[in-house]
Image (cartoon, grey):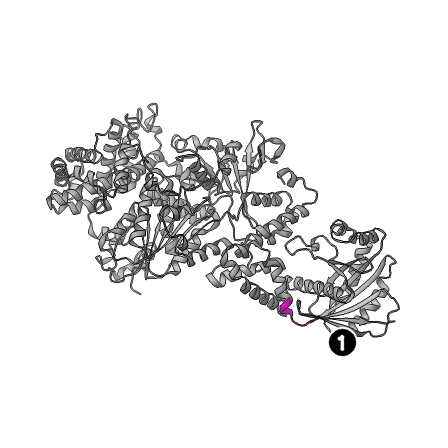
């Protein structure tokens, strides 16, 4: 049984309006590494996300006028997104999708800042999503040249680490990670692919945290991961909690 | 990727993903992309459905998804929400772009596919502007469509008056005036005493500038607008034109004030089908090289005609006018039509009954195939169907009651009427050259695919028997000339039109008399003045017009009128009429004589039908001779011939053919070809004689009546067919004001609705 973890080093990210905390643990399983993301300003993430779509769309470069309106469009769209995300009265698919993206982006950035991971770009929003074709949500490559398969779970009122961990476990068992092979072969380094070929890889289970004491949630997550992600081929397990 | 690649793709998600990437970054810039999307929907419906909302969002059709359910669509819809905030509607990106262009520039020339909704944006701009506005469109059918949509736009606004000719009535209210005019009628704008404050001119379907005759009239209007309304904003709109900037160059507008753009973005997909000589039906793409070769096609899984005419689709069948007249148009489809049930709808029934009445087909002896087909949801739409009936037919189509619409090119010319399927029974397209044929053709097939409000990607089908010709037409480009036809020498070698066109070019056209000075001189000769007087002496001989013209006792008067008018017209065109022309002319005057006696269209058709079908002889023997209508003058019309061939039995005379031909006489011959000439003649006559009866004759020529209440009602914008009924409720009417009797509140609903705008606030 793990002791309650403690906060370690802190990194601030003004680009995405987040703070990232390393979390030290006394887990008996060395391969488990933990961090905590605190979203300080959701407006920044929301605008950044709106930009990734609007910036590349034909509609914003149709004429001078559409270009001129761009900043206002981004701002208003981001506000509308936050509104729908924070609405407690009408939970929506859009809000949940945004929550998951926020968890994905927060965790990959945290892994980049704290553990020096290389992020494999998240599939563009307009392309068919994995949701229709079950699989992992994002990928990183760590210093040990392992591809880490990431699963992001969001909930507006709980801390779904159980879902993230269980789903990761099931996907590995069902070999869903191998579905991404073609895509990864293009984007990841050769040694990382080599490791994957040799059945060595990592898992990232990231999840939103809705609790007064995030460390308590992380402690539970560690215990669950120790039990469920103990497979030999899983060389590393990253647990990332994301709170607002 | 061609059709086969898409249809047989093992991982369609991958291809769809690539397509979404292109759509997201470049937009629906070509028919080819929209065709590909259609094939994904067709061949991979399951995966397509999961991505459909994103596709709709990436097309910019935000109004289809007011509440997006995925993040991508939600974020992109931010643009739509902004349009809603800025312009009050979920405009598409192209519509918004057009709107910005119109807001921010003085001279605007744009091109966009028929279904892109450019006119919609411009209409909204006009609605939100102040000052008077003029919309110039090429046909009377389009005028009526614009009048209807503008009236809807301004519903309830009593300070905006929409008129289809230039006039200055209702001075007491002094409303903002919006004129919807043809280029010919637009000449009246330059008459001195109108005191208009026109701030915007909208030239829709401005490619008319490229036509030999009308191009001159059109360009002259543009030049005069430039000169006399130099502060006004000018907007030119075209479908499928490569270089809309040519309109700016043609007339030396300042390029710095100008904006031009050709938008190619579409919103509806189209797939193409053809029938091979082997009798099988194939999907083919006109965008791929030799796309009709079987190895590049996918076979349609059933007989395409069985699919198209199963009664669940709306199909536009393009046929020739000749086949409608001779009845052959229907033969290939008869077996399907025979299986259709009659329409079961109260509202459709009402419309059909109105049509039946207007055509005079509610008489037991008048069998109208047009009406009986309507009851099964089969409509006929072409230029010889009376305009009023055409609008009712269009209502039936819009309400979704039409399974098949047999149409000639009239429907394609700007009338906004989409179908699930366009079935090209022939490929004969009228046009002055290959370019203009291609443009008309694109307009025609542009009717395939109905843009719905539902959150679905919409696509339609185009069927042809000539895939190669279709591919050629689809891929042909249309470019405007950069030099105006006015500045190009030798445009017409037809002596009948060259006098008019030269006078317009040389500025020797008299606006008041609406004729070249040389023609005015001819009509002022003493002999012609004498014929004009003789006409007036017959029509205004103490008694009523009817008493002077009706019945056997007045046969001599009628014959005299025909001859007097003939001499006047021959002086007008400066030659004698050929035999064939004369037959048309005499029939036209005979119909005109009935019109001015107060006979309705249905009555006139009834009289003609009785004569041609020999009713008095019990429909025995062969049909009587009847020269079909034709525009006059027509130098090739040297001989007479009958509309029904000589073997047609009297009992087999088609009532509909008589309806169409009679309407052609009223529309093409009397209104279009003769009235202007006679008006000029009587204006010249008045100048020479000061005979006040000339004014009454002018009124009679313009409105078909000398009843002053009736003419005022028409000038106030009421439809001619309703003025008799309405006049019962008029207390007072003059140029300043119109006052209804209190009894109007007990009038039939349609009259009350018509009168409502004119009542005080």
Picture layout, residue B231 above or below residue B493: below
Q: Chain of mark 1?
A: A
Q: Give coordinates of residue B753: x percent, y percent.
A: 34, 57
Horizontal placement of B475 versus B495: left or right? Answer: right
Q: Front-most of B675 and B200?
A: B200
In this rendering, does residue B365 appear at all? no
The C terminus of chain B, quarter of image: bottom left
Name the element at disc 1: loop
The question of residue B372 being in magenta is answered with no
Q: Residue farthest to the bottom?
A: A212
Q: Mark 1 packing: few (<14 Cα in 10 Å), some, or many (20+)?
A: few
The quadrant holding residue B563 is top left
Where are the magenta residues, as a range? Answer: A38-44
Q: Give coordinates of residue B542: x percent, y percent.
A: 11, 44
The quadrant holding residue B382 is top left
Q: Give coordinates of residue B283: x percent, y percent.
A: 58, 36
Horizontal placement of B280 versus B732: left or right? Answer: right
The question of residue A42 being in magenta is answered with yes
Q: Give coordinates of residue A8: x percent, y percent.
A: 79, 74
In the picture of the structure, the residue carrying the numbered disc 1 is: A213
- The residue lying at 24 percent from left, 62 percent from top is B172
């Amino acid at each position: 049984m793990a002791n309650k973890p403690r906060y370690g080093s802190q990194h601030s990210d003004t680009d995405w309006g987040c703070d990232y905390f390393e979390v030290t643990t006394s887990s008996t399983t060395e391969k488990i590494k933990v961090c905590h993301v605190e979203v300080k300003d959701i407006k920044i993430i929301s605008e950044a996300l709106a930009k990734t779509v609007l910036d590349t769309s034909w509609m914003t470069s149709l004429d001078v006028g559409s270009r001129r309106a761009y900043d206002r469009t981004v701002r208003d769209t981001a506000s509308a997104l936050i509104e729908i995300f924070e609405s407690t009265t009408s939970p929506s698919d859009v809000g949940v999708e945004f929550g998951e993206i926020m968890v994905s982006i927060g965790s990959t950035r945290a892994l980049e800042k704290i553990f020096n991971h290389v992020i494999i770009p998240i599939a563009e929003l307009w392309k068919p999503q994995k949701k229709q074709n079950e699989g992992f949500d994002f990928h990183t490559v760590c210093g040990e040249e392992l591809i880490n398969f990431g699963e992001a779970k969001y909930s507006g009122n709980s801390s779904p680490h159980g879902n993230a961990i269980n789903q990761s476990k099931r996907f590995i068992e069902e070999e869903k990670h191998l579905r991404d092979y073609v895509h990864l072969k293009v984007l990841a380094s050769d040694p990382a692919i080599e490791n994957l070929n040799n059945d060595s890889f990592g898992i990232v289970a990231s999840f939103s945290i809705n609790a007064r004491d995030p460390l308590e949630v992380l402690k539970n997550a560690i215990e669950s991961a120790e039990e469920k992600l103990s497979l030999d081929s899983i060389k590393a397990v990253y647990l990332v909690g994301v709170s607002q | 990727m061609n059709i086969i690649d898409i249809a047989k793709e093992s991982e369609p998600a991958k291809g769809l993903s690539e397509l979404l990437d292109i759509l997201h970054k470049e937009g629906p810039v070509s028919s080819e992309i929209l065709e590909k999307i259609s094939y994904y929907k067709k061949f991979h419906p399951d995966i397509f459905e999961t991505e459909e909302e994103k596709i709709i969002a990436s097309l910019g059709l935000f109004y289809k998804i007011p509440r997006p359910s995925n993040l991508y669509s939600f974020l992109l819809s931010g643009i739509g929400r902004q349009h809603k905030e800025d312009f009050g509607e979920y405009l598409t990106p192209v519509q918004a772009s057009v709107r910005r262009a119109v807001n921010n520039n003085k001279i605007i020339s744009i091109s966009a596919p028929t279904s892109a909704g450019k006119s919609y944006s411009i209409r909204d701009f006009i609605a939100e502007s102040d000052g008077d506005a003029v919309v110039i469109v090429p046909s009377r059918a389009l005028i009526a469509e614009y009048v209807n949509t503008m009236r809807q736009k301004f519903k309830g606004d009593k300070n905006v008056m929409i008129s289809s000719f230039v006039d200055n009535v209702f001075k007491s209210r002094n409303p903002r005036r919006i004129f919807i005019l043809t280029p010919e009628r637009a000449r009246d704008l330059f008459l001195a005493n109108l005191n208009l404050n026109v701030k915007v001119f909208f030239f829709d379907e401005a490619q008319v500038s490229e036509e030999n005759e009308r191009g001159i009239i059109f360009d002259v209007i543009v030049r005069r607008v430039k000169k006399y309304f130099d502060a006004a904003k000018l907007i030119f709109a075209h479908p499928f034109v490569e270089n809309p900037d040519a309109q700016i160059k043609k007339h030396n507008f300042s390029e710095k004030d100008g904006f031009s753009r050709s938008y190619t973005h579409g919103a509806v997909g189209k797939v193409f089908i053809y029938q091979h000589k082997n009798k099988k039906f194939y999907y083919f793409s006109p965008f791929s090289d030799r796309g009709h070769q079987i190895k590049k096609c996918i076979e349609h899984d059933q007989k395409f005609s069985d699919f198209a005419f199963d009664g669940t689709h709306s199909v536009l069948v393009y046929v020739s006018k000749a086949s409608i007249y001779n009845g052959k148009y229907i033969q290939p489809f008869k077996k399907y039509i025979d299986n259709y049930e009659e329409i079961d709808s109260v509202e459709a029934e009402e419309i059909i009954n109105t049509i039946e009445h207007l055509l005079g087909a509610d008489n037991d002896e008048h069998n109208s195939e047009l009406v009986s087909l309507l009851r099964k949801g089969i409509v006929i739409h072409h230029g010889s169907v009376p305009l009023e009936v055409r609008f009712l037919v269009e209502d039936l189509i819009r309400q979704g009651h039409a399974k098949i619409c047999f149409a000639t090119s009239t429907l394609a010319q700007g009338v906004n009427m989409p179908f699930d399927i366009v079935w090209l029974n022939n490929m004969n397209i009228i046009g002055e050259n290959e370019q203009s044929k291609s443009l008309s053709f694109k307009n025609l097939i542009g009717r395939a695919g109905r843009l719905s409000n539902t959150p679905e990607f919409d696509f339609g089908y185009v069927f042809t028997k000539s895939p190669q010709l279709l591919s050629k037409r689809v891929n042909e480009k249309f470019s405007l000339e950069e030099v105006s036809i006015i500045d190009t020498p030798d445009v017409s070698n037809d002596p009948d039109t060259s006098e008019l066109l030269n006078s317009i070019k040389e500025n020797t056209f008299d606006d008041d008399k609406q004729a070249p000075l040389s023609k005015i001189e001819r009509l002022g000769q003493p002999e012609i003045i004498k014929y004009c007087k003789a006409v007036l002496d017959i029509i205004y001989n103490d008694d009523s017009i009817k008493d002077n013209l009706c019945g056997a006792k007045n046969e001599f008067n009628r014959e005299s009128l025909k001859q007097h008018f003939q001499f006047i017209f021959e002086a007008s065109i400066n030659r004698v009429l050929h035999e064939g022309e004369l037959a048309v002319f005499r029939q036209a005057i005979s119909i005109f004589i009935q019109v001015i006696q107060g006979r309705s269209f249905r009555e006139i058709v009834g009289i003609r039908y009785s004569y041609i079908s020999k009713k008095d002889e019990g429909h025995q023997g062969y049909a009587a001779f009847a020269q079909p209508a034709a525009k006059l003058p027509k130098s090739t019309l040297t001989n007479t011939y009958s509309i029904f061939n000589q073997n047609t039995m009297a009992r087999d005379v088609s009532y509909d053919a008589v309806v169409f031909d009679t309407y052609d006489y009223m529309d093409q011959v009397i209104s279009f070809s003769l009235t202007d000439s006679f008006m000029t003649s009587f204006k010249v006559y008045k100048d020479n004689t000061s005979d006040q009866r000339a004014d009454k004759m002018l009124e009679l020529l313009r409105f078909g009546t000398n009843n002053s209440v009736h003419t005022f009602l028409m000038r106030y914008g009421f439809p001619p067919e309703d003025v008799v009924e309405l006049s019962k409720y008029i207390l007072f009417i003059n140029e300043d004001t119109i006052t209804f009797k209190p009894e109007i509140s007990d009038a039939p609903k349609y009259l009350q609705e018509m009168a409502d705008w004119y009542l005080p606030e």
